Image (cartoon, coloured by chain):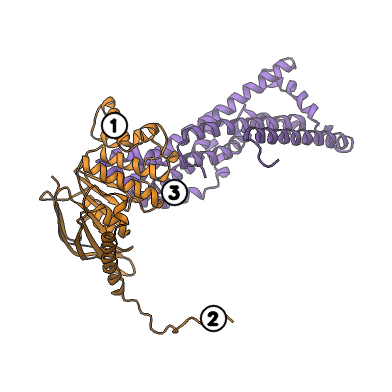
Chain colours: A orange, B purple
Amino acid sequence: MSEITIEHLSVSFTRRRAGAFAALQDVSAHITPQTFVAILGLSGSGKTTLLNVVAGLLQPTSGRVLLDGRPITGPGSDRGVVFQQDALFMWRSVVKNVEYGLEVKGMPRAQRRALAEHWLTVVGLKDFAHFFPKELSGGMKKRCQLAMVLANEPTTLLMDEPYGALDYVTKCQLQDELLALLHTTPKTTLFVTHDIEEALYLSDRVLILSRGRLIADMPVTFDSPRTNDLRLSPEFAIAKQRLWRSLDGATQQRPLSLTGLPASIPEQP
Amino acid sequence: MLATSRPHRQRRALTYHIASLVALLAFWWLLSYYTNSAHIIHGASALPSPLSVLNAIAGLSVFLAPGTPTTLAHGLAALWQNTLVSAERLLGGVLLGAAIGITAGLLLAWSKLVRLLVQGPVLLVRTIPLMALVPLFLAWWGGTSFGILAFIAFAVFSVVVISTVEAAGNVPPELVNLARTLGAARFRIYRTVILPAIVPAVIGGLRVVIGIGWALLLAGEYLGAQNGLGHVLIMAEDYLYTARMALIVVMIMVYTFVLDRLFTLAADWITRWMPKD
């Protein structure tokens, strides 16, 4: 089922000089099974920290995160993570990368090869099974990472700005592919992004983080299947504006002082 | 011509390389021709000509057994015999040192505490002047082949162990996290992520070590050995056989070149997954 309950979650890091830094402060949310939740925020807002706690890679300072009622104590193959970087084992061929999680589970060679090839077909990399990751384009690397995670059949999908480094058209293609995939194999998905459009297009719900706090929680109700026409529709623009304002409001709360600066920058003589 | 094909460019580069080498050989010949009349040290030419270097092969016959007739075939046999002895010491030392160094490096990198504990001593080992250790190794093992092999192995070990520990510390944390989220436990991560990820760095360390390997080998053989290329070289100094000295130098150059080519081929194949920039 995989239902995620975040209860008063706080995470702080201690830095040698600056003292404690609160990456997350008292965040609570309940995520129902098979919902696509986008976690939206600017750089340093604590989005990745939140994702890493759910992944089990980071321990909460206080509060807790429950997965189907049980507290998360560490990473597990029930939660698949697609990392921001091109996290692939460069020394393994594409198909061997996809097989990794199955190897860990102790699946026999022939069975895991068949399963890996199935998932490579799903993400459209069947013809690249025996390539090394260095021979793939940015978009193909992301597809490979997704296949690697999906082969493990997790019930929860955690994605950390996966498409941040891609060009716009490739990014849109991968978003459509992801939606189609989740339509056939539904999973609870947490998708971290700083891209307002991406958050809106993909999700059922947007959580906005700012400086470690949850400042907004908005449902997204566009019909599925979503197509590129939606990106250009007036209602999409209106929703985009609302999210933009929330993010903008968040920036203005920053203790950024502009007093003492000259009213206009003097021109160079 | 603006665009030339790759094979064409390679062929052209090869032509230039061969041309410049031939020119260098001709220059050597000319130089030896003009200096030989003027600079004779105790009857030997200061700069032997390329031809006299080739002729020096036969003279190596004496290294086979006392009383062996001086022929080209015997000379070549002696050269080959001493090459094998030296190669065994060099490659044996490199392999032994690399095996121990990589194993020790992986064990040390396992725990942060151990890593911190050994950091000091390992830095100390790096300050040891290797050449100054030759007499010590000879004192321990006498002039045996194993003494020289052990000396080379020690030098290789001291370089490889450090590069292994450093490389293990430099593995991108996201790869370790990826393995963790796919369910891998610590030992499996060590075997399937850390170990393959450090291979390029270890190969880089080995390349450096093989480069200094010849110098270490010669130092060991000068002082203690009863055979090997270093022994032949230092014996030639006693009789001022400059042509023989030059012969051994040229042979070592050839061997170094061949060994480096083979190593590069193997290394390129092993790290064929690495992005080339």
Which kind of residue does numbered mark 1 sit on? His
Which kind of residue does numbered mark 2 sit on? Glu
**Mark 3 or 2, which is nearer the eye?**
2
- Report if residue A211 is visible in the image: no
Do residues under tags 3 and 2 come within 8 Å of each other at their CB atoms?
A: no
For disc 3, the chain is B
Which x, y percent locates residue A169? 39, 49
In the image, is A223 to the left or to the right of B245? left
Which x, y percent locates residue A223? 21, 51
For disc 1, the chain is A
Residue for badge 3: B122
**Mark 1 or 3, which is nearer the eye?**
1
Q: Are marks 1 and 3 on the same chain?
A: no
**Quadrant (top left/top right/bottom left/bottom right) for the C terminus of chain A:** bottom right
Residue for badge 2: A267
Instruction: Report the Cα–Cα distance between label 2 and label 1.
Output: 63 Å
In the image, is A97 to the left or to the right of A207? right
Residue for badge 1: A118
Instruction: Report the Cα–Cα distance between label 3 and label 2.
Output: 58 Å
Dividing the picture into quadrants, the one containing residue B221 is top right
- Report if residue A188 is visible in the image: yes
**Quadrant (top left/top right/bottom left/bottom right) for the N terminus of chain A:** top left
A201 or B275, nearer to the observer: A201
Residue at image position (28%, 50%) is: A159
Dividing the picture into quadrants, the one containing residue A109 is top left
Label 2 residue SS: loop
Neighbours of disc 2 within 10 Å: few (<14), some (14-19), many (20+): few
